[in-house]
Image (spheres, grey):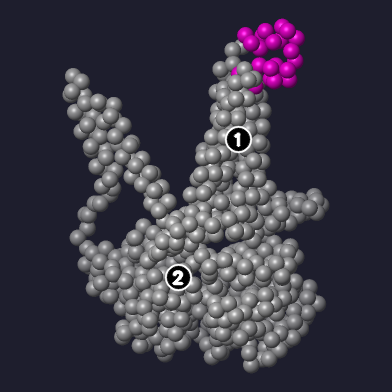
């Protein structure tokens, strides 16, 4: 009984601030509401309009490409760093601390710092060195602006993933490495044959979480490009915010958000299934 | 034991829940509180000081000044929450028209305060949108004049005269380029700044009824805007090298340092420019889009208007505050500090930036007629990068039609 009472505040909070707004949102997705004032029901027309809206489709394309590349990069780099930081190296604890720093900085704050670096410092350095390709701001180039956003996102997200991988690496018993070494396995073979299967669960969790986070990318884009140049780096979250609040198409963008929520949930389930099966077969 | 623990847990849970739900509804102050939503970042301190003066004159009222960046978005999020401020300052633009059409703001059409306002500005507001036919949902406070800002010293030094036609403008451009001075300083990185020259270009090269026709589906951007858009491209061919990464702040600073002869922004940019160089003499001429000097005119809009919540909780106090804000001295002080045209009859601003604007004929900002759901700024920025006119204009047309189809209200002026 007392457990019930202990859970109650959290449950109330969750219902009031999460479940009810979600249901309200779904309700508004069937209206032409601007978020205020009078509105009418429009049935499913918001949803059908979504699929022919180029701006929405290109936002989906951008977001998925971005999330895919970012997830692969973040997990690759984080795993490599974690293996390094788990080894017997000098200043190990200090280095672990330093590598964690990006995680405690607010994305918006470092976003504006990166913005400055990419729009002012980098072009200046590049033109001093005579590198023509980088002498103009890549954030002003519709083809390349996403790379700037990606750099910020990866730099910031690696920190947290390193911590998870480090935790995972500590669960691998040292005997396994000793046995593998006795069998004559080199470092790469030991990593493939021992480390990776043993921390498969952590890889699954990390990739699922990173992908989900990167699909919802928002702050990075706002700080670096604000969706520009043009609409080249508009992610779905940015589009929902801009179209819904700046453009006054609240109902329409809520419908977008509902679809997006379903897509993310579907993605997480599929990914979880696939990766868990592979993880199990490895072990 | 178990029972007691359970009771204690229950009490704690109840307290926590109550605390969370109650929020912070603490009233220690006996005064009536007015929320004053103030959109103009540049005039933040001015309005804060004003609010303090008003509080001193009216000890029974407390004014909470709410200064926000990106005011329209912030206001929309407040409206979604049903939390409308008591008194607001806003820019007289498209979103204002949309809010007004939704009936969010009070009607001032029969208000004596409106009688002292220059009628042209009242009409601008009425045309943007109204909650009911004939309503005026705001009081114009100041206006701006958007043309081309120019460095008067550089013009005098090189013996260049202010152009009145497109050809003359092109000769001015060539004259400065021959001297190695970039004619314009582009601020393309901030997408909205690209609309500043586009507004006079479209106003002068299309018929006045263009937007009415476009709403009715009788014309397209591809037909109507071709000339304007080409000329916009031409202007941006004559900027500083590598214009891509420069934004509003960097551009205004560079202009103040004499790094370009002209800047494609309106009078509203003058305070920003002078912030780095107070004595800088800036001129402002109407951007000529055709070779017919008689068509050359400034684009002017209501830079700041004062309005109130349609059914706020404190109408009497709100009224007192608005009357205070509309005092001629308050309007004049603001206009001088912000380089704006005072909206009250009989008031004038002698600033060099407005010297030509006051008497000249003006047209309204076309982007205020534009459907806000269409990202006109970013799309124009995109065009200036890739220069694909057909893609840009067709894109505008198809987005316009699609948005118009899925929206049943809030398009253009009041339609209900």
Residue A6's image quarter?
top left
B266 w.r.t. A63: above or below: below
Q: For the residue labelled by badge 1, is the local secondary structure a helix, a strand or a loop?
A: helix
Residue A97's image quarter?
top right
Q: Locate the N terminus of chain A by quadrant.
A: top left
Residue under the image location 54 percent in, 35 percent down: A269
Instruction: Give percent across and percent down for residue B225.
Output: 66, 77
Q: Main secondary structure of the magenta part?
A: helix
Instruction: Give percent across and percent down for residue A198.
Output: 61, 18
Chain to which the residue tagged by mark 2 belongs: B
Q: Locate the C terminus of chain A by quadrant.
A: top right
Please determine if labels 1 and 2 lie on a single subunit.
Answer: no
Camera-nearest residue between B189 and A229: A229
> Which residues fall within the magenta stretch?
A175-198
Chain to which the residue tagged by mark 1 belongs: A
Instruction: Give percent across and percent down for residue A102.
Output: 57, 38
Residue under the image location 33 percent in, 74 percent down: B106
Q: Mark 2 points at which residue?
A: B409
Residue under the image location 75 percent in, 9 percent down: A184
Q: For the residue labelled by badge 2, is the local secondary structure a helix, a strand or a loop?
A: loop
Q: Name the residue under label 1.
A: A158
Residue A178 is one of the magenta-drawn residues: yes
């Amino acid at each position: 009984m007392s457990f019930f009472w202990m859970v109650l505040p959290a449950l109330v909070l969750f219902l009031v601030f999460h479940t009810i707004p979600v249901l309200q949102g779904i309700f508004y997705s069937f209206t032409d509401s601007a978020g205020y004032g009078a509105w009418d029901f429009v049935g499913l027309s918001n949803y059908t309009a979504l699929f022919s809206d180029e701006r929405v489709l290109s936002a989906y394309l951008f977001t998925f490409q971005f999330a895919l590349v970012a997830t692969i990069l973040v997990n690759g780099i984080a795993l490599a760093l974690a293996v390094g930081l788990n080894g017997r190296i000098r200043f190990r604890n200090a280095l672990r601390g330093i590598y964690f720093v990006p995680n405690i900085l607010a994305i918006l704050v470092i976003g504006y710092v990166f913005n400055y670096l990419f729009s002012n410092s980098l072009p200046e350095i590049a033109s001093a060195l005579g590198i023509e390709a980088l002498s103009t701001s890549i954030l002003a180039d519709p083809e390349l602006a996403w790379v700037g956003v990606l750099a910020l996102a990866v730099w910031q997200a690696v920190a947290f993933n390193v911590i998870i991988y480090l935790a995972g690496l500590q669960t691998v018993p040292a005997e396994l490495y000793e046995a593998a070494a006795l069998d004559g396995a080199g470092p790469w073979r030991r990593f493939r044959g021992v480390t990776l299967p043993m921390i498969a669960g952590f890889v699954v969790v990390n990739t699922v979480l990173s992908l989900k986070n990167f699909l919802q990318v928002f702050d990075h884009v706002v700080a670096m490009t604000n969706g520009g140049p043009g609409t080249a780096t508009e992610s779905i979250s940015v589009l929902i915010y801009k179209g819904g609040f700046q453009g006054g198409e609240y109902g329409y963008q809520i419908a977008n958000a509902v679809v997006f929520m379903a897509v993310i949930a579907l993605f997480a389930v599929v990914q979880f299934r696939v990766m868990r099966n592979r993880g199990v077969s490895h072990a | 034991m178990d029972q007691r623990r359970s009771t204690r847990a229950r009490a704690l849970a109840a307290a926590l829940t109550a605390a969370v739900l109650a929020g912070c509804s603490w009233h220690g102050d006996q005064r009536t509180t007015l929320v004053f939503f103030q959109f103009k970042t540049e005039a933040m301190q001015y309005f804060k000081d004003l609010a303090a003066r008003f509080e001193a004159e009216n000890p029974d009222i407390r004014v909470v000044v709410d200064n926000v960046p990106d005011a329209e978005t912030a206001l929309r999020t407040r409206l979604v929450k049903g939390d409308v401020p008591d008194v607001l300052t806003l820019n007289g633009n498209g979103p204002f028209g949309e809010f007004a059409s939704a009936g969010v703001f009070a009607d001032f059409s029969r208000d004596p305060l409106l009688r002292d306002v220059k009628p042209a500005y009242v009409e601008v507001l009425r045309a943007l949108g109204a909650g009911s036919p004939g309503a005026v949902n705001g009081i114009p406070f100041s206006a701006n004049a958007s043309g081309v800002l120019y460095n008067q010293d550089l013009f005098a030094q090189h013996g260049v005269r202010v152009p009145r036609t497109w050809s003359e403008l092109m000769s001015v451009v060539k004259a400065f380029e021959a001297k190695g001075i970039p004619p314009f300083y582009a601020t393309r990185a901030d997408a909205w700044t690209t609309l500043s020259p586009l507004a006079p270009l479209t106003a002068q090269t299309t018929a006045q009824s263009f937007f009415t026709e476009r709403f009715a589906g009788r014309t397209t951007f591809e037909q109507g805007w071709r000339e304007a858009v080409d000329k916009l491209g031409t202007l941006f061919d004559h900027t500083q090298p590598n214009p891509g990464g420069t934004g509003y702040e960097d551009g205004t600073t560079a202009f103040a340092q004499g790094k370009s002869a002209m800047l494609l922004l309106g009078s509203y940019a003058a305070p920003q420019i002078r912030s780095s160089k107070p004595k800088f003499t800036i001129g402002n001429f109407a951007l000529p889009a055709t070779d017919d000097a008689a068509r050359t005119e400034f684009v002017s809009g209501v830079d700041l208007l004062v309005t109130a919540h349609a059914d706020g909780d404190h109408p009497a106090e709100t009224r007192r505050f608005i009357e205070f804000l509309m005092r001629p001295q308050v309007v004049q002080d603001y206009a001088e500090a912000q380089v704006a045209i005072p909206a009250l009859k009989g008031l004038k601003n002698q600033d060099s930036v407005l010297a030509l604007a006051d008497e000249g004929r003006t047209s309204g900002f076309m982007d205020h007629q534009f459907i806000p759901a269409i990202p006109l700024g970013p799309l124009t920025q995109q065009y200036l990068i890739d220069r694909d006119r057909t893609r840009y204009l067709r894109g505008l047309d198809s987005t316009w039609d699609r948005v118009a189809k899925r929206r049943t209200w809030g398009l253009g002026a009041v339609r209900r």
